[in-house]
Image (cartoon, rainbow, N blue to C red):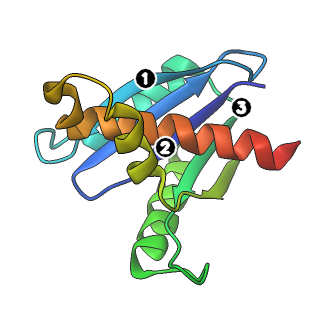
Amino acid sequence: MKLMGIDYGRRRIGLAVTDQEGWSIRGLGVIDRKKRDNYFSVLISLIREESPQVLVFGLPLDVEDRETVMSQEVRRFACRVEKEIGLPIAFVDESLSSQKASQLLSFRKKKDRRNKALVDKIAACLILERYREEQQ
């Protein structure tokens, strides 16, 4: 089953997809919300182009696994996407996904380590990885 991971942020939305079988994960890209007024329609177009069966949103929880203000914002955004696209939505705890993505980049060139868009794209990959682990 093909999945799309979405790392929602107020500045950027990181995206990742799996292959049709749901095994391999690749970063799809990042939508910079500050640079694109039409970021929502760009996201919807990418979803339609990739044709996933499920959209997996990262849900930021606090250190005690409780929802935060940002969690509610993610849920509202996911609901908006679901109404527009009509695909099943899933949520997975994204705690520390951006930090883990930064750690993975720590061995790369300095330019890559500072690339926040790259961090968001990798975070979307980690969201899909966590979702797959929870489904097994």
Q: Earlier in the sequence, mark 3 or mark 2?
A: 2
| Location of mark 3 (residue) | 53
Local secondary structure at mark 2: strand
Q: Is residue 78 above or below residue 120?
A: below
Asked whether 111 or 20 is in front, the reply is 111
Q: Residue 112, can we see it?
A: yes
Asked whether 13 or 108 is in front, the reply is 108
Left or right of residue 33, residue 77 in this image: right
Residue type at the position of mark 3: Gln
Name the residue located 20 percent from the left edge and 22 percent from the top edge.
109
Residue type at the position of mark 2: Ile
Residue 6 is labelled as 2
Left or right of residue 12, residue 97 in this image: right
| Location of mark 1 (residue) | 28
Report the Cα–Cα distance between label 3 and label 1: 16 Å
Q: How many other residues sit within 10 Å of disc 1, few (<14), some (14-19) or many (≥20)?
A: many
Name the residue located 22 percent from the left edge and 41 percent from the top edge.
116
Q: Position of residue 7 (x, y in %)?
A: 44, 47
Q: Are marks 3 and 1 in contact (CB under 8 Å)?
A: no
Q: Position of residue 130 (x, y in %)?
A: 67, 46
Q: Is residue 75 above or below residue 131?
A: below
Name the residue located 26 percent from the left edge and 59 percent from the top edge.
10
